[in-house]
Image: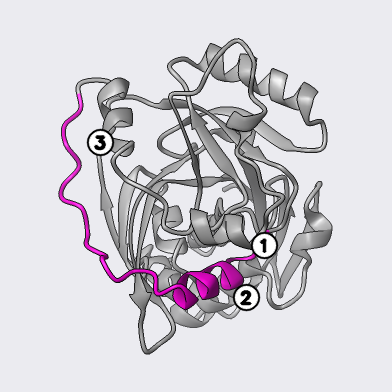
């Protein structure tokens, strides 16, 4: 039997995000079409047997992620341990490559990866992971699924959907931290969510063009408050004067990562190289959006 397990924890991308008014519990109803990046835009988690639960973190985002009790990987491990009645532990190692406070669910992806790997390591029923996932955050249930899906309710209602094909894209983060809490607070202060309704079933698109056309009629309700809070945020379209123009650009989640959709992966890669040259301090990845490579 393997003595360790490893998996990617890919970036989550909201192709649209509709947000309802704040509820008495401080949460919001959500309606979002979620997809996942490829290994180019992912953390990586490894678990090994151990008597106790420990976490080590390396990589570009190690300092921001930290190894304290508030790290979602440790929270997920402890929650799963308690739910399944497990006495032994695990040594977890996270290679943190995704930017933090970026609107792409990096912490949630890491937590979901921990739930998947520890389910295998401890040889327990996967239902335990699905039970604890909603307690860890709104993005964790959909990250645990790892497939294109509608994410609804407070994140606990996850419905898989079929896309016509993987979507060529760029993920662009200018290096500005954009914590979720203040963005939601600004949304609430502006009276956001009054016209919230869930969209209908995803149409059966024949090709990528049909999907992009439909997405153009949707929105990200958190984009305006995020831009108002962080005036330095600029859509890459303002500087992307390269040879290929994106089909659509939208902020993911509460920001500050933008997603630009393209007709081909070659066009996305070409534009990503141009962006890197123009803004070397930015985090830029060309990838295919769809289901996660787990």
Relative image position of residue 212 (x, y in whole percent): 33, 29
Relative image position of residue 76 (x, y in whole percent): 56, 70
- Residue at numbered disc 3: 162
| Horizontal side, residue 20 vs residue 181: left or right | left
Between residues 19 and 141, which one lies in front from this camera angle?
19
C-alpha gap between disc 1 and disc 3: 37 Å
**2 and 1 marks in contact (CB < 8 Å):** yes
Q: Give the SS element for disc 1.
A: strand
- Residue at numbered disc 1: 49
Question: Which sits earlier in the primary sequence, circle 2 or circle 1?
Answer: 1
Relative image position of residue 31 (x, y in whole percent): 31, 58
- State whether residue 12 appears in this view: yes
Q: Quadrant of residue 48?
A: bottom right
Q: Residue at x 68, y 70 (%)?
A: 71
Question: What's drawn in magenta, residue-wise?
Answer: 178-205
Q: Is residue 183 magenta?
A: yes
Q: Give the SS element for disc 3.
A: loop
């Amino acid at each position: 039997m393997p003595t360790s397990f490893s998996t990617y924890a890919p970036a989550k991308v909201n192709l649209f995000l509709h947000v309802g008014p704040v509820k008495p519990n401080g949460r919001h109803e959500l309606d979002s079409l979620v997809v996942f990046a490829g290994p180019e835009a992912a953390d990586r988690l490894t678990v090994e047997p151990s008597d106790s639960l420990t976490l080590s973190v390396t990589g570009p985002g190690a300092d921001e992620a930290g190894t304290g009790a508030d790290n979602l990987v440790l929270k997920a491990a402890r929650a799963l341990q308690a739910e399944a009645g497990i006495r032994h532990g695990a040594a977890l190692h996270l290679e943190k490559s995704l930017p933090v406070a970026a609107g792409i669910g990096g912490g949630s992806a890491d937590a979901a990866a921990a739930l998947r790997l520890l389910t295998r390591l401890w040889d327990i029923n996967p239902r335990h992971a699905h039970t604890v996932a909603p307690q860890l955050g709104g993005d964790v249930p959909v990250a645990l699924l790892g497939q294109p899906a509608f994410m609804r309710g407070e994140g606990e209602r996850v419905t898989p959907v079929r896309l016509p094909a993987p979507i060529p894209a760029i993920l662009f983060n200018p290096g500005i931290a954009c914590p979720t809490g203040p963005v939601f607070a600004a949304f609430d202060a502006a009276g956001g969510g009054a016209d919230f309704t869930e969209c209908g079933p995803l149409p059966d698109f024949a090709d990528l063009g049909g999907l992009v056309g439909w997405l153009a009629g949707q929105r990200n309700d958190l984009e305006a408050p995020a831009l108002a809070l962080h005036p330095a945020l600029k859509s890459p379209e303002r500087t992307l004067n390269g040879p290929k123009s994106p089909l659509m650009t939208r902020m993911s989640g509460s920001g500050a990562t933008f997603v630009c959709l393209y007709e081909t992966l070659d066009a996305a890669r070409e534009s990503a190289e141009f962006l890197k040259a123009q803004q070397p301090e930015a985090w830029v990845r060309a990838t295919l959006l769809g289901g996660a490579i787990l």
